[in-house]
Amino acid sequence: NEFQSIYQYFFTRRTLYLICWKMTEYDMNEQIFDTIHNILINIQ
């Protein structure tokens, strides 16, 4: 993920995060869920 290294610069307490993901059957794999999980952990 090209943006993963800069995520931390956008996380603030006064921000509302909306994560949208268009998932197809092709995308339904463990790697995509790991990516989403990591994003959610960073937001937390």
Image (cartoon, rainbow, N blue to C red):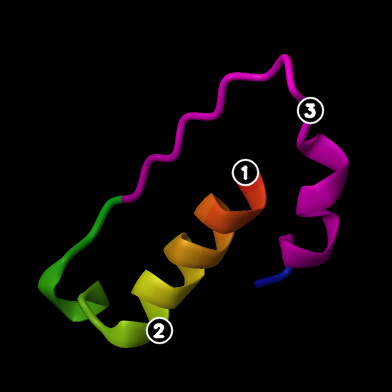
Q: Of all residues shown, which one is farthest toward the bottom?
A: 30
User: Local crowd at mark 2 within 10 Å, few (<14), some, or many (≥20)?
Assistant: few
Residue 8 shown in magenta: yes
Cα gap from disc 3 to disc 1, whole angstroms: 9 Å
Q: Tell which circle, 3 or 1, labels the residue nearer the N-terminal end.
A: 3
What kind of element bears circle 2? helix
| Disc 3 and disc 2 in contact, CB within 8 angstroms | no
Residue at horizontal 19 percent and vertical 79 percent from the top: 26
**Quick check: 6 left or right of 44?**
right
Residue marked by disc 2 = 31
Residue 14 shown in magenta: yes
Residue marked by disc 1 = 43
Magenta range is 3-21
Cα gap from disc 2 to disc 1, whole angstroms: 19 Å
Residue 11 figure quarter:
top right
Residue at horizontal 49 percent and vertical 70 percent from the top: 35
- Kind of residue sitting beneath label 1: Ile
What kind of element bears circle 3? loop
- Kind of residue sitting beneath label 2: Gln
Q: Of all residues shown, which one is farthest toward the top?
A: 14
Residue marked by disc 3 = 12
